[in-house]
Every structure is written in structure tokens, then in C-alpha cells.
Image: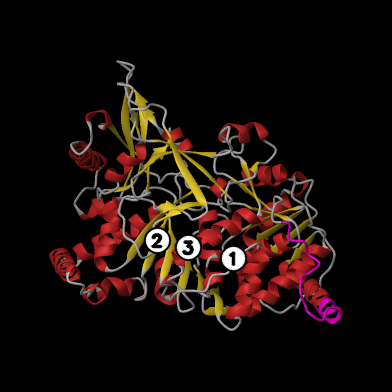
Amino acid sequence: MSQEKFELKNLYELVDGANNKFANKTVYKFNRTKDEEVSITYGEYYHYVRKLTLAMNEIGIKDQKVVVMGETSVQWMATYMATVFAGGVIVPLDPGLLHEEIINFINLSEAKVVVYSNTFESLFKEQEAALPTVEKFVMTNKALFTLEPDEEYVDEKYISYRSLLTMGEKLYKEYNESNDDNKFDFFDQDTEKMQILLFTSGTTGTSKGVMLNQRNICAVENDIFPVFSILGPDDVVLSVLPPHHTYELATAMLAPFMLGATISISDGLKYVVKNIKQFQPTIMTLVPLFASTFYKTIQKNVEKQGKTKKLKKGMKISKFLRFFGIDVRRKLFKDIHEVFGGRLKYLVVGGAALNPEIIEFFDAIGIQMSQGYGITECAPLISVVPLDKFNTHSCGKPMEGVKVRIEKEREEDNYGEIVVTGKNVMLGYYNRPDLTAEVMTDDGWFRTGDYGYVDKKGYIYITGRKKNIIIASNGKNVFPEEIEEYIETIPYVSEVVVVGRENEKTGDTVIAAVVVPNYDECDAHGLHEDETIYEAINHAVHDLNQKLESFKHVSVVELRKEPFEKTASRKIKRFLVK
């Protein structure tokens, strides 16, 4: 269904426009408790956010920092919007951070208000003295969520979100009585000033505060619209990734407002399969780890049921029929589609390159998988493969308002650093003009730190992160991500990080794969001891080496029993892998 586009100038237009077009349509669905599902319309959310905006203004957050952290919730998104509408600066934090990192980031941002889910109550009560700039702690609780105020606001340091809503309700009535048109005309939406502060992953010493404004965010949403315009009010997005992740925010939380789609909120990683069956999404945005897990789970279940040959035969038949324009994939692979709720049509993957084999598999069974590419400093989208296109290796063409060029270090290289310009590019790093200067070219383009190339049709291909490159003994660059893609296809492998190791005897750099085994899969194949597991994985890696150029061969395999430490968006913290 093609949608009529409206060009966003600020985020208030996004919420206001959705209310005008889809007021009675459900915007959010979530489980308030284990047995209670809640639905909220675009109209209800519109008034909810307006009330909270008035309350935020009343407690003085204009030009001040407001930290928000916790699980995905309506309160989380309402805090984001209300802070921006009231002229404040929203600071989304990863709830998976160590407590020490949370305290450090709050102090680095000089936050005046902290909005947090009830799981962090004890932390802030214990660490209050370590947070000198914070004047208000506002606690949310999904289980107590309500659109109606029912708890009197008391001007204290620790307050509930519901009491903040009470204040907003009172101010809202007063404002509506004194304003016939009920418009927020007294809030100046300055789209050029910094209103979003995002701390990149890494230790607190290496993490940088990315400064974004409303122009950056709206530029991305305007560019997303043509890509997602085949979606509409009948579509359902399942939000799995945390909203502090800019990719999730842009694609799963903000884009649906232009389309009138419903956003269903997952209960957490443990409940994704259950939520898929419950909410029956038509589209999901994922990181590669999730996509790979889905793929491996399907393969495992098919093998367990003894239907591997039947699946492969079905895929061949389907491919033959599609050549003549006959598409029977959803009928032919009905059992697999039922696992995904029966309505899933699209998977949009971003965060890192995905194995093309996985994209081809999902396409073969009738689920379109599109890769996107972005970085926090670009708010975050740079490119994406349109939902009606198919490309297994590329992360898409640059978004409409984005320009990309490749800067090679050597003329003979077939790749170089991806450099970007557009309205989506950040204002700079918070209080670090020196670091900002390092990533900006003389003509004002942003250096992404990613290496890749662009083909003749304008599609971007990522080869790897600049900082992850391993310099082989022959001087050639090795991108660990490329090798990891191959190793991740080994059924005995759950997770892998490829690193460079120094050979103690020769001093040469060798390629090492640090592997977390998939113990369930190993057990199913009679591999119970560490020694036999190592032998099986080492043998499989040796076979994969034959597909790689000699200087990319993995010489060392190391087993690791515990999963790698990850961010809340399920990215491995590579800097911690020793």
C-alpha cells in the first residue's frame, strides 16, 4: 500500500501528523503484565505526550539533559518525545551498561532529570550522592502503565511517572481552556540545536557523546519513507531491539508513525518467539545475530523432524515456479511461516554484514530480508536495500538525502573508507571538538571508519571496520568480519570473533578465531568433551580456509565457554576480547 508522504520538519509534526491521519488506529501493543495485553491508539498517544510535554516544561528541562533508560515501553518513547518537544536534550542510555558506566555517563552529560524503569530503583537510591547534577528521579513501571493520572504529583526528588502525568493533566486542562486552537504554538521547535545525546559503545574512557538535532532525525525519517512506503496501517512491527539503539528508534519506533502501522513491543529476548506468535508481525528490524539465530533454529528443527530433503526439494520447486511468475512460497513453507506468526513478510537487518546464504534462504521461503547500513553519527541510516528489491551482498544504495564517496589509501585497492555527507550527519562529539575534527574531512564530510566499495549501480558493500583490520604478515589487510561470516555457518559455532595474534616463535601476525561453541548442537552430534568439540570445529574451520585467500587463513582456533559480553542491541564488545 503506497502512502502519501509528508515531509517532516520536526518531530512534533510526526506525532501531530499521525494523530490527524490515524487517530483511531492502534499505535502500540504490549503486555502490561503476563496475562494482560494493552493497546493504545495514535490519538491517545498524541494527548499523552502533550500532557507529559507540559509537565517536562514545568519542571524546567528546557536546554537541560534528561536521561532515559530501561526496557522498551510507551513511557520510554513518550519521555523521548516530551523532552524534545519541551526544548530539552534527551540522553538515552543502554540499560545493559555496568552500574559504574551508568553513573559516569549521567555525570558526563550533566543530566538534570533521570527517567528510569523500576529495575534500577535501588541503584539510584544507593548512588544519589554520586550524581550531583540530578534534581529529579522519575521511575516508570510497565505493569502500572495507565493513560489516566491517578497519583497526585508531589514536588519531591523521587517521583513516579504517573504523578508526572497528573501534573501534565492539570496543565493540559488549563492550557486547553485558554487556547481555542489547542496548538503547541508556545514551544519553539529549534531543529538545529542539539537535542539528542547518544553515547557510543565502549568503555567510559573511549565512548563518545554523539550530538544530534531534530533535523538529523527528520532527515532519516524522510529518507526512510520511500523505502518503507509499501507498508501501511495493516502492518505490524515487532520491536525487539532497545530504543536507545538509533537503528531501532528510526526504523521500528519512528517510521511507523508516517505509515499508520502498529508497533508491538517485545517482552524481552527470552520471549521473542512467544511475542512473534502473539502479535503476528509483518515486519521486524534485527541485528545479524538475531537473523543468524532464526536461521540456525529453523535448520535445526527441520533436521530434527527429518525434513531436510523435503525442504530443499520444496525450495527447488519454488525457484522453478517463480521463474514463470508463480509464487507459492507462503503455502509451500506454511509450517515455517506459522513459527513467525503467519504474517511476517520483511526482515530488515542492520548493524553488521550478514551472511548472503541467510538472505537467500529467507527469500527462498518467502520472507524478504533487506540489509541496511548506518552509524550513530549519521542518525543512523546511510543506506538500505528497498523492501521490494533483492540483493544478497549489498547494504543498499545511499538514502535519498545522503551522498557517499570512497577514499582509498592506495590506488590499487578496490576498497576504501566510506565517507558521508547529508542532513543526517551529527553536529559533533559532546565537549570533544578535537575528536570531531578527527572524523571530519577538510570539505566537511564524515569519515565512518568503515571500509567498503560502491558498484556501478550505486550499491554499497561493506568489507569491515577500519579499527578491526588485521595487518597480515605480507602487509595485506584482513577484515575479520568477512572470515566470521564463514565461521558462523558452522553448526557447532554459536559465536565467533576473529582477531590477530602474534606468533611467539616468528613474531608474525596470525589469524585466530575465538569461538563460543553451540553446545546443544554439539551434544546432538555426540560431541560432549572439550577435546572432541575442538577437533570438530578446528576441522570445519580448516575446510573453510579453502574458500579464502591464503593470507586470510585461520591458523588458530580458541574455544571460549562463556558467551561474549554484548551491548543491549546484541553487538559483541570486541574491545573486551583478548
Q: Would residue 185 be counted in the magenta stretch?
A: yes
Q: Quick one: 382 or 566, which is closer to the camera?
A: 382
Q: Nearer the viewer, mark 1 or mark 3?
A: 1
Provide residue 84's location: percent of width, then percent of height: 70, 60
Q: Earlier in the sequence, mark 1 or mark 2?
A: 1
Task: Give the spatial CA distance, label 1 vs label 2.
Answer: 19 Å
Residues shaded magenta: 173-190
Left or right: 233 with respect to 545?
right
Q: Would residue 118 be counted in the magenta stretch?
A: no
Neighbours of disc 3 within 10 Å: few (<14), some (14-19), many (20+):
many
Provide residue 331's location: percent of width, then percent of height: 24, 77
Q: Secondary structure at mark 3?
A: loop
Q: Main secondary structure of the magenta part?
A: loop
- Residue depicted at 66% across the width and 73% down the height: 16
Q: Quick one: 474 or 394, which is closer to the camera?
A: 394
Task: Give the spatial CA distance, label 1 vs label 3.
Answer: 27 Å
Q: Nearer the viewer, mark 1 or mark 2?
A: 1
